[in-house]
Amino acid sequence: MLIDHSIQKLEKSMDAKISDQISQISEKWFDNVFQVVGNVYFDLEMLQDFRLGALMLMSTTDTELKYINSRLTAYDKRYNEDTVKYFPVLSKTNEQIDEFIVDPDNQRTLAAISPMNNFYKELPNFFHYILENNQRCKSMEMINIHIGTNSLTYPQDLKANIVNQIKSFNPLLTVTIYNRPLMQLDYADIQSMDMVFFNDLSIHVNNETFKEIIISRMEYASKRIFTYPVISEEIQEGESPEALLHNFKAVFGVFAEFEYIRRGVEIN
């Protein structure tokens, strides 16, 4: 059946290397759509794993840190933010992690220590594809990178580190980091995005601004939205996570060009 084949394709894409997935996505869109990309938004949580960083900082021994590292393969395949489910030996709760992240006394250390996701390491290649696309469209304008955070206030000097690193990828990149997510930016800024990368799209679908711009007005119909594969509801016995993700993509794909990005994180 067509649906079964689509689910199999989704499963295969979730197992692909992030570098291969970025290449496939870029070939799919940039080789066929001649549209200048001028504004790109990222949730900072898509680039840096603060929940894993909090768990690392809450752990007190080398044995616990080695245990966290040993569980990353399973953690990378999760479909929700139930972090502690993948590290049961540590006896922590998700509520403890949430409280740790929002505590102002922890945020500088958290921003400095939390590991960058593998997707962040692929940004130079991704920006290369965007620049190639724009050149084919006869554009050498700056590409504006916007980064927002859903969970913490990022220290100004550490913001500067990320800004400088991304700008070093190419002189045509500008970078702005906000201590708030996309749907809290000005209406015009939200409308201006050509590509959006959400850490968890499911937390936005009931946002009034999101529903107005993306659902009611369909202003992202020709734009591109990416997200990690997150299922907001509890998966019932006998249900396939891949089937639920496929169904969500089929529905939401009416309102935007939509694709999942594989998770991945490494602890150095």
Image (spheres, rainbow, N blue to C red):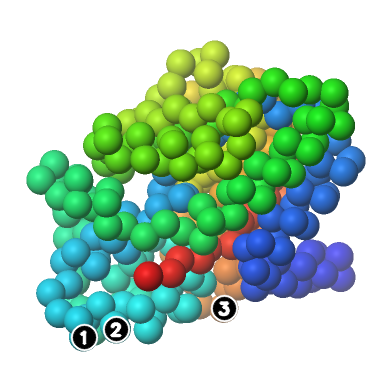
Q: Is residue 43 visible?
A: no
Task: Give the residue pinned by disc 1.
Answer: 63
Q: CA distance from mark 3 to mark 1?
A: 36 Å
In the image, taking residue 258 as reference, residue 100 lies left or right, namely left
Alpha carbon distance from label 3 to label 2 = 30 Å
Q: Which residue is mark 2?
A: 67
Residue 33 occupies quadrant: top right
Category of crowding for the residue at label 2, using alpha-carbon neighbours closer than 10 angstroms: few (below 14), some (14–19), many (at least 20): some
Query: Dot 3, how many residues are within 10 Å of its Cα: few (below 14), some (14-19), or many (20+)?
Result: few
Q: Give the quadrant of the C terminus.
A: bottom left
Q: Which is closer to the viewer, label 3 or label 1?
A: 1
Residue in the image at 70% along x and 43% along y: 128
| Residue in the picture at 63% in, 63% down | 18
Q: Are the two marked residues, 2 and 1, in contact with CB atoms closer than 8 angstroms?
A: yes
- Tell me the element at label 3: loop
Q: Are marks 3 and 2 in contact (CB under 8 Å)?
A: no
Residue 22 rendering spot, x and y as whole percentages:
69, 55
Task: Give the CA separation, mark 2 to mark 1.
Answer: 6 Å
Q: Nearer the viewer, residue 19 or 73?
A: 19
- Relative to residue 109, is residue 7 depicted above or below? below
Please name the amino acid that badge 2 sits on.
Answer: Tyr
Residue 98 location, x and y as percent?
22, 53
